[in-house]
Image: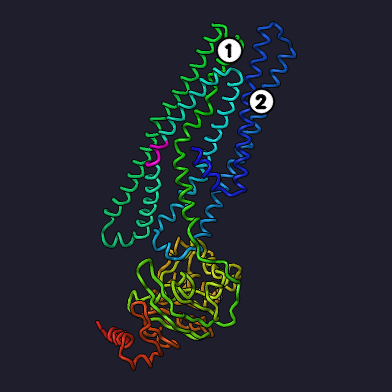
Amino acid sequence: MIATLNKFFAFCSAKHRRMFYGALLLGVLIAFCEVLKYPAINLILHGFSEKRMTGKLILFSFLLLLIGVLAEAAFRAKQAMLQCRAGYGECANKRIEIAEKLRFLPMGYFNRKSLGDISSVTTNTMEQLGDVATLVVMQTTQGLLNTALILLMLLLFDWRIGLIALTGVLLFALINARMQHENESLSKQKIANDTKLVENVLEYIQGISEVKSYGLSGESERKLKDSIAESARVMTELELASNRYVPLQNGVLKLTGLGILLVSLRFYLDGSMDLITAVLMMVMAFHVFAGLSSMGSYSALLRMVDLCVTRGQEILSLPSMEIGGEDYKPRTEDIELDIIDFAYESRKVIDGVSLRIPSGTSAAFVGPSGSGKTTLCRLMARFWDVQRGAVRLDGKDVRDYSIDALMENFSFVFQSVYLFHDTVANNIRFGKPDATMEEVIAAAKQACCHDFIMALPEGYDTVIGENGASLSGGERQRISIARAIMKDAPVIILDEATANVDPENEKELMEAIAALTKEKTVLMIAHRLKTVRSADCIFVLDRGRIVQRGTHEELLREDGIYRRFVEARSEALSWRV
């Protein structure tokens, strides 16, 4: 228990940790205020027994009670405010911190981890940390402090009663430890099921078109229902496991309170305790363990807190790519690869590749599926770090640039386009956040998407669904190109940029891309012959190696993959129905 509490506080930022400590300090003051009622009762009882009850004594006792009640209310209000600000503030900060961490992780991490796993950590786990964990930690810590304070007071009043109370607390602690041990495995199952549930929900929603087209809605729905049912089962088991121990914990505390009452009465009857102390002990017996009882109910979730912190720490402790480079602005866009190797874990994808792309020229990458074309282009923009050799921009290793300085030099248009749940204008403006509306419209016109945007219900202010779900594939592609036009970076990477474009818009779009890429360094990955034939240099890849390089005409004169590629495309174009 103590280890989990320390782990939680260590995970928090210094600012919010101070807030939590402040809330705990207020909890101690609240405990003192609660204890004030007993000296007041003691004064009244002594006044009655000694027949010296006066107005002054009554007034003093009443003021003591009033001060305790008012101070407790003020401290509780301040404590609740600190607790909420620290809990939800830490949750927000950790989400931002994790997002920043993900930004600088190698892309290989995202290949290994599912979207559901990452989403679960940033949503469910952090939500539990900010909401449930904060309440559990504060109630548990508060219960421990209050109980320690009351035990100390009991030992000072009468050490025998104090020892009885201490025995009850130790029995409570043994039962609580057993409960947490049983909850540990169930808490792990709950975290795993939360992740699995998010994965299956995302898979079901994202693949709904394929599910319907192949008539697999029943199977996919069954998979989702099974995840929901399993999550419900584990949650029920977790609750039942706690409910087996919480009544037992409370029973021990109630019996200990009853024991204090009976023993106090016994001590009075045998003359070893005066009447006033005995009555006070009997009154306290009903309230002494209130804080500990509340703590026992919440402490059942401490293992969940521990796992939430662990999952957050796992991401935050991952080794990031080295990002402390120089904010260097290159004078040219010369790109050079010097005998680079790269592998996804044990599978080698790029094998000893060397090439040079002069500034202001275009390079096309062709080859069979899985030959390493996309990986090679992404290595140039440092989506990953090479395992051997170096990638240089303007003669400087890309690892020596700061990430932001490096990214300023690249614009990307991928075949798989991601659009945000926002207005069309803001999706285009993503390439340049401070762009004016006139600049947005100009970029849209270049990308041949102005007309269809104006046909939308609210034009550029139309909010499109997540990932542009309300737009066609070609429309999403053109908005992505408008975004790249808006950024106006000196190096353009086109990964099948025209793959989803309607034939009637292809000519205009190719003209827009030509205007975008004028006097810039262009890297293109394409299977369409017309896309690559005008490139200044074509690199042909096979199994991670460059097997051919040259212009379209030069490669046609060679017997190799490129000529077979051209012949296959030409034959396909000659087909007629």
| Residue that protrudes farthest toward the left in the picture | 577
What residue is at 45 percent from the left and 88 percent from the top?
Answer: 536
Check if residue 140 falls in the magenta segment.
no
Q: Residues within 10 Å of mark 1 (few under 14, many from 20)?
A: some
Q: Residue 2, position in %: x, y?
A: 51, 38
Horizontal arrangement in the rendering, residue 502 relative to residue 100 (left or right): left
Question: Residue 486, located in which quarter of the rendered image?
Answer: bottom right
Residue 459 visible somewhere in the drawing: no
Predominant SS along the magenta part: helix
Question: Residue 528, located in which quarter of the rendered image?
Answer: bottom left
3D distance between C-alphas at marks 1 and 2: 21 Å
Amino acid type, residue under disc 2 in the picture: Gly
Which segment is the magenta one?
A: 180-186
Choose the circle earlier in sequence order: 1 or 2.
2
Question: Residue 519, located in which quarter of the rendered image?
Answer: bottom right
Q: Nearer the viewer, residue 138 or 89?
A: 138
Identify whether 466 is placed above or below 485: above
Q: Which residue is mark 1?
A: 279
Q: Which residue is mark 2?
A: 68
What colouring does the structure picture have? Answer: rainbow
Horizontal arrangement in the rendering, residue 469 relative to residue 267 (left or right): left
Q: Nearer the viewer, residue 170 or 332?
A: 170
Q: Residue 512, position in %: x, y?
A: 49, 81
Residue 140 visible somewhere in the drawing: yes
Q: Residues within 10 Å of mark 2 (few under 14, many from 20)?
A: many
What residue is at 47 percent from the left and 21 percent from the top?
Answer: 254
What residue is at 63 percent from the left and 35 percent from the top?
Answer: 26
Q: Nearer the viewer, residue 412 or 419?
A: 412
Mark 1 or mark 2, whichever is nearer to me: 1
Q: Secondary structure at mark 1?
A: helix
Q: Nearer the viewer, residue 453 or 183?
A: 183
